[in-house]
Image (spheres, rainbow, N blue to C red):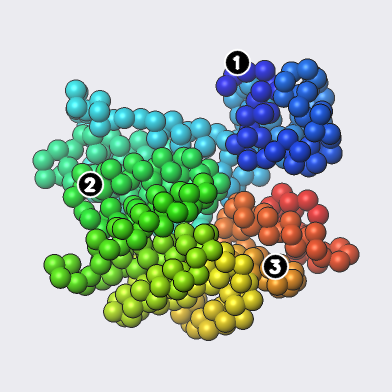
Amino acid sequence: MDELPIGRRVAYWRGRRKMSQQVFADRLGKSKSWVDKVERGVRRLDKFSVLYEIADILQVDVQLLLGKDPERRTDALNCIDQVEVQEIRAALERYDSMSAYFDAAPFPPPLVDMRKAVNHAWLTYQYGRYGMLTRALPKLLRDAQAADAGHGGDQARDAAHLLGQVYQIASSVLRKLGECDLAWLAADRSMAVAQRADDQLLAGIATTRVCNAMVAMGRARPALELNVNIANRLAPGGANEATPDRLSVYGMLLLQGAMAASRLGDSATVDDLINGAQEAAVLLGGDHNHYWTSFGPTNVELHRAAAAVELGDGGRAVEVHHQRIPEPSFNGLLPERRAHHLLDIARGMAQIGDVAGAGEMLLRGDRLAPSEIRCRPIAHEVMSDVLRRTRGAPPPPIAELAEHMGVGV
């Protein structure tokens, strides 16, 4: 993009942020005509103060707008910056397995080292340390791709399994941070690799990543159909033994199908799928983390609340589902799951007009996993809503969190 005029770069990043010219103009305090002239190159952008304001609104480094290599932001400790986005994109664009078809890598990374690195990456994700994870992802992707390309024989499936997991980790964190196109690409790669790993359960959980990315891109109907289709194929019974691994993957497919159905406003399907997941959770007998799913009865209740919020029934999410989650069980979940739920409840409270309660949920989530609140676009929307509807000055803790999030008071 270096060769593009600056106006075209502004238009590109505005499109990536799914912002209309009018919305962008409003946030910038300019007219839509002014934005249109800048993007067409009719009007010059020669004031650095305006450039920095545009970069702030578009959430990109100002160097990208100038066509230069972006500088790492000093305030990006918990979030992803454009350097990391480009590095992850470059890693996803590698095709080591095809190169190895012609010329195998002589010294692939040892699988024992890869297992440790992948396990560490999963825990980093589930503890909500997204900044740390995104900085590690490019190298982890390259190493996992090299291992998959270089190991053959009995080790080939293990290497493919590890690469499939790395793609899933990448997809999950990229989706949370709003990079939906890359999240879909990584998830799609994970499904293909899972087939080479010859692991139906890995393919099943990869399906949930693909469908989550599809929902984030507004494709809820095909996401629902795919989740349910694969869930039916993996359902316990007959030749499919009801192992803890299978119950966990099957249950998560149903839960993610329910979330897709909630985006469609299909409350009957939501209830059917969550009730099916509840049956699997009862058979599982508690909260576990098989295949890194965090699946169990408590996670089912979290999804009941999340689905209610998506259906616009914030009152039910807050007053029914949230209230009946046992506190010890909730506290036993990993930080990402708990902070994610608190963000959902903040959304539910905002729906019913309890902006003070919504702000308190954001603060609680921030104490658990700051990246889940400070880095997610949906959390920024909730905070903006809280600030807009708060009478007078917001409480100091809310104002401070909003400042950390980069949301204007």
Residue 226 picture location, percent across and down: 35, 54
The span from disc 1 to disc 2 (Cα, nearest Å) is 40 Å
The reply to whether residue 314 is visible in this rendering is: yes
90 versus 349 height, above or below: above
User: Against 197, is 7 above or below?
Assistant: above
Q: CA distance from mark 1 to mark 3?
A: 44 Å
Residue occupying image coordinates x 37% and y 72%? 277
Q: Secondary structure at mark 3?
A: helix
What is the distance, in whole Å, between disc 2 and disc 3 at their CAs? 43 Å
Q: On the image, numbered disc 2 is attached to which residue?
A: 195
* Residue highlighted by disc 3: 350
Residue 42: quadrant of the picture: top right
* CB within 8 Å, label 2 to label 3: no
Q: Nearer the viewer, mark 1 or mark 3?
A: 3
Name the residue at the right extreme.
392
Direction from residue 376 to residue 381 in the image, left or right:
right
Q: Earlier in the sequence, mark 2 or mark 3?
A: 2
> Horizontally, is 19 left or right of 297 in the view?
right
Tell me if mark 3 has few (under 14), some (14-19) or many (20+) residues whose alpha carbon lies within 10 angstroms of its own: many
Q: In the picture, which quadrant includes the C terminus? A: bottom right
Q: Is residue 74 left or right of residue 27?
A: left
Q: Residue at x 25, y 32 (%)?
A: 97
Q: Which residue is the site of mark 1?
A: 3
SS of the residue under disc 2: helix
Contact, mark 1 vs mark 3 (Cβ under 8 Å): no
- Amino acid of disc 1: Glu
**Amino acid type at mark 2:** Gln
Image position of 140 with respect to 226: above or below: above
Answer with the quarter of the image where residue 40 lies: top right
How many marks do you count on the picture?
3
Percent position of residue 96, x then y: 29, 30
Residue at the location (68% across, 68% down)? 351
